[in-house]
Image: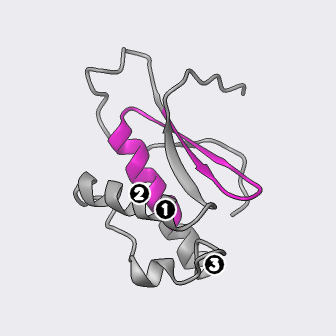
Amino acid sequence: MKTRRPVICRVGERPTAVPAGGDVYGLIDWDDAPILIVGPSTDAVTREAIRIFARTLAETGGLAEDDPDFTRRHPLPDPDGPIGVIDSWLTRLRRATAIPWFAILDDEVVIAR
């Protein structure tokens, strides 16, 4: 997947743990084109990552070159389903393959426009 623009989450409420005006950042690391996801909460960013993985799977037929059967063995979770199921799937993805992977960034991130 080739994109270098940040993805802004469409839905979700800002949790009280994130100060007003603050954002949560997630990163999908592909081999050549990382995707930065910006959203109001960890859950919103994580759900958007699953939507991006789903679009990529539909476009390319696979996610991980080093484990092409990963999504056959572990189907993508519903992005609107329980966050625990989504987190478990992302953990399996991190264990099964080096690229792609997803993480919530816990350091301050500055985005230049």
Q: Position of residue 104 (x, y in %)?
A: 47, 39
Name the residue carrying label 2.
91
Q: Which region of the structure is painted magenta?
A: 25-53
Q: Which mark is residue 95?
A: 1
Name the residue carrying label 3.
60
* Front residue (pair 10, 19): 19
| Amino acid tagged 3 | Thr
Q: Residues within 10 Å of mark 1 (few under 14, many from 20)?
A: few
Whole-angstrom CA distance, mark 1 to mark 2, is: 6 Å
Whole-angstrom CA distance, mark 1 to mark 3, is: 21 Å
Q: Position of residue 36 (x, y in %)?
A: 60, 42
**In the figure, 55 relative to 100: above or below?**
below
Q: Secondary structure at mark 1?
A: helix
Circles 1, 2 touching at the beta carbon (< 8 Å): yes
From this viewpoint, is residue 10 visible?
A: no
Q: Secondary structure at mark 2?
A: helix
From this viewpoint, is residue 60 visible?
A: yes
* Left or right side of 102 for 18: left
Q: How many marks?
A: 3
Residue at the spot x=54%, y=24% of the render? 107
Q: Quadrant of residue 92?
A: bottom left
Residue at the spot x=58%, y=72% of the render? 63
Q: Position of residue 46 (x, y in %)?
A: 41, 48
Circles 2, 3 touching at the beta carbon (< 8 Å): no
Q: Which mark is residue 65?
A: none
Q: Position of residue 48 (x, y in %)?
A: 44, 52
* Front residue (pair 109, 20): 109
**In the figure, 89 relative to 12: above or below?**
below
| Amino acid tagged 2 | Thr
